Image (tube, helix red, strand yellow):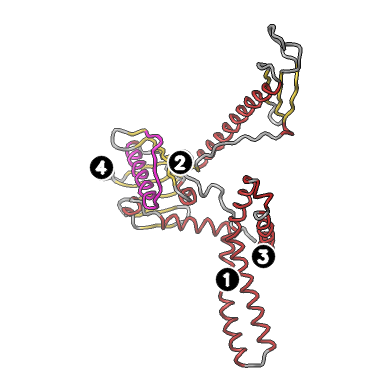
Amino acid sequence: MLKKLGVLEDTYKDLTEKISDPEIINDQKVWQKYMKEHADLEPIIMKYREYKAVLDSIAESKEILQEESDEELRELAKMELSDMESKVEPLEEELKILLVPKDPNDEKNVIVEIRGGAGGDEAALFAGDLLRMYSRYAERKGWKVSMLSSNETGVGGYKEVSFMIKGKGAYSRLKYESGVHRVQRIPSTESGGRIHTSTATVAVLPEVEDVEVEINDNDIRIDVFRASGNGGQCVNTTDSAVRITHIPTGEVVSCQDEKSQLKNKEKAMKVLKARLYDRALADQQKEISAERKSQVGTGDRSERIRTYNFPQGRISDHRINLTLYKLDSFLDGDIDEMIDALITVDQTEKMAAIN
């Protein structure tokens, strides 16, 4: 861990110099990139420097105890040593947490999709309960909720509903909600008083950013040739037509509409960028579809992450074996206790991987 922190401190020093360099400041795009990297590293480096100062203080106190005969100085050194030694372990734990790789999507807004699973009308009603729960949670956090689409049932539930939650760090907290949620309760339509089990699936996706297309000059080959066509002064007399080949993808665009080679090149580049944008967007959508599939499974009762048991007033999360007896407030958006516990387990597992 200390070796890794040393490398990060060197990177931080290098970035500090770069963001003060007038040449780099003039290139705003590069400067902003370095500023973000610098800001991301700062909390880790400040904590590491605090940790190093504590270790230096311990070494200093030990040296005084070895070399000093003055009882008063020795007593002060003992107190300092005891105080500093008590700080080592907590600082090491904080550093481990700070070293846990951050999810690049954590600060993003989220799209939440809820679908009624097994259980018919009761599953659709439960999907409506979950929609209200997440809406109330967002309200408590000061986040904004906007509906995207919904397919309501006649009984006041939802076959499916999707909505966006906009707010800083929304994905970092709601990403743990993806999976199958199971409800056990007596439906209002049940005359015999039997408990029914139904499910709803939840998918939490980070908001998709616009895909930008950057074309590297080394990735394209430009050929010029004589335009072919009917008549016209420049046809077949000058090399005005342009063909651009994008080597990595094999996309080929030709343009010979304009008399000017430069204008044909500009048009061909626009078409090429549009095609590459379309490819990138399709790839991104495929990735999101795969993520959605992996998150929600089939909606079967057995693939549950959490159970909401109404008769017992409890919520049990099966991933971390945590049960809370506050169903009413939980469904009213008071879900932070559960989310905090999930984050702690997630961070602990990631910290265990850091040497």
The residue under label 4 is 188
User: At numbered mark 2, what does the secondary structure look like: helix, strand or loop?
Assistant: strand
Mark 3 Cα-neighbour bin, 10 Å: few <14, some 14–19, many ≥20: few
Q: Where is residue 120 drawn, in percent x and y?
A: 35, 36
Which of the two discs, 1 and 2, sits closer to the camera?
2
Instruction: Check whether the beta carbons of the residues at disc 1 and disc 2 lie within 8 A of each other.
Output: no
The answer to if 192 sits in the magenta stretch is no
The residue under label 2 is 111
The answer to which of 69 and 292 lies nearer the viewer is: 69
User: At numbered mark 3, what does the secondary structure look like: helix, strand or loop?
Assistant: helix
Say whether disc 3 or disc 2 marks the residue closer to the N-terminus: 3
User: What span is in magenta?
Assistant: 121-150
Name the kind of residue labelled 4 in the image.
Ser
Q: Where is residue 81 drawn, in percent x and y?
A: 60, 81
Mark 2 Cα-neighbour bin, 10 Å: few <14, some 14–19, many ≥20: many
Instruction: Check whether the beta carbons of the residues at disc 1 and disc 3 lie within 8 A of each other.
Output: no
Instruction: Check whether the beta carbons of the residues at disc 3 and disc 2 lie within 8 A of each other.
Output: no
Q: Which mark is residue 2?
A: 3
Question: Which image quadrant: the N terminus?
Answer: bottom right
Quarter location, residue 238: top right
Name the kind of residue labelled 1 in the image.
Glu
Vertical arrangement, residue 57 with respect to residue 309, above or below: below
Say whether disc 4 or disc 1 marks the residue closer to the N-terminus: 1
Residue that extends furthest to the left in the rendered view of this protein: 191
The answer to which of 170 and 265 lies nearer the viewer is: 265
Which of the two discs, 4 and 2, sits closer to the camera?
2
Query: Separation of disc 1 and disc 3 at Cα?
Result: 14 Å
Mark 4 Cα-neighbour bin, 10 Å: few <14, some 14–19, many ≥20: few
Residue occupying image coordinates x 34% and y 47%: 184
Vertical arrangement, residue 68 with respect to residue 265, above or below: below
Query: Separation of disc 1 and disc 2 at Cα?
Result: 39 Å
